[in-house]
Amino acid sequence: MILDHRSLSDDVATIIRKMILNGELNPGGRINQAQLADKFSISRGPIREALKLLENEGLIKHETNRGTFVATLSKQDAFEIYTLRALLEGEAAQLALTHLTEVDFAKLEGLIDQFYHSMKEQDLESQAQCDILFHSTIVAASRHTRLINIHKHLDTQVGAMYLTVANQVPMRVDQVVENHRVLLDALRTKNQKKIKEAFSEHYTTALKDLSGVAQLQE
């Protein structure tokens, strides 16, 4: 595997992040730095730097005298992540109303179509990315820099959470696609009350799906 040495730690973080999101590294699993260094044919320095980046994202946790592990998300984590996203996105969507263009709506339509095909092909990583891009497109249109940055910080954790649910709970293609189309239709109404209710319901439903996931700790 050839890596771009101009930003080696970032490249390594990208690869390890992908390994976590596609299930190659499982929640709670120990990360062996020596094995990763051998796998990528590099020294351990960039591996350590990459793991620090991922720890800041909440994907990795380091335990003194034990080692480094893929973070295990709890039901409390799920509650905090999704309720915070509901609040942020509900507000962002209302702020975005005056900025969303037909180009933005076309992009959102395209992401829903891509979501559909990814689910048909059972490509979990692509599904997670579609989900993140769909929501981040709406939030970006708010033009609220601090809100956008806070929302973006949760993206990777939401991606990991999505994959946890997808691996544990049967997901109907039509239902998942419809859940996102409801959000898009609400935005098209330009009715702030409907938009706020739609985003709140979107994440309330997600939390219900998570309630029976065995991988999530109490």
Image (spheres, rainbow, N blue to C red):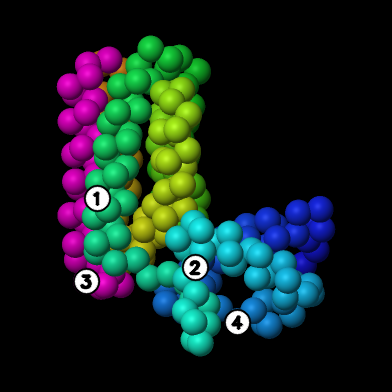
Query: Label 1: how many residues lie within 10 Å, few (<14), some (14-19) or many (20+)?
Result: some
Please tell me whether mark 4 sits on a helix, a strand or a loop.
Answer: loop
Residue of label 4: 32
Q: Main secondary structure of the magenta part?
A: helix
Pick the residue in front: 69 or 104.
Answer: 69
Mark 3 or 1, which is nearer the eye?
Answer: 3
Is 29 situated above or below 163? Answer: below
Image coordinates of residue 161 in percent, x first then y, are 36, 58
Q: Is residue 91 visible?
A: yes
Please report whichever mark, 4 or 3, sits nearer to the chain's N-terminal start. Answer: 4
**Looking at the rendering, which quadrant does residue 88 occupy?**
top left
Q: Which mark is residue 218?
A: 3
Q: Do labels 4 and 2 touch, CB within 8 Å?
A: no
The kind of residue on which mark 2 rests is Ile
Residue of label 1: 206
Please report whichever mark, 2 or 3, sits nearer to the chain's N-terminal start. Answer: 2
* CA gap, disc 4 and disc 3: 27 Å
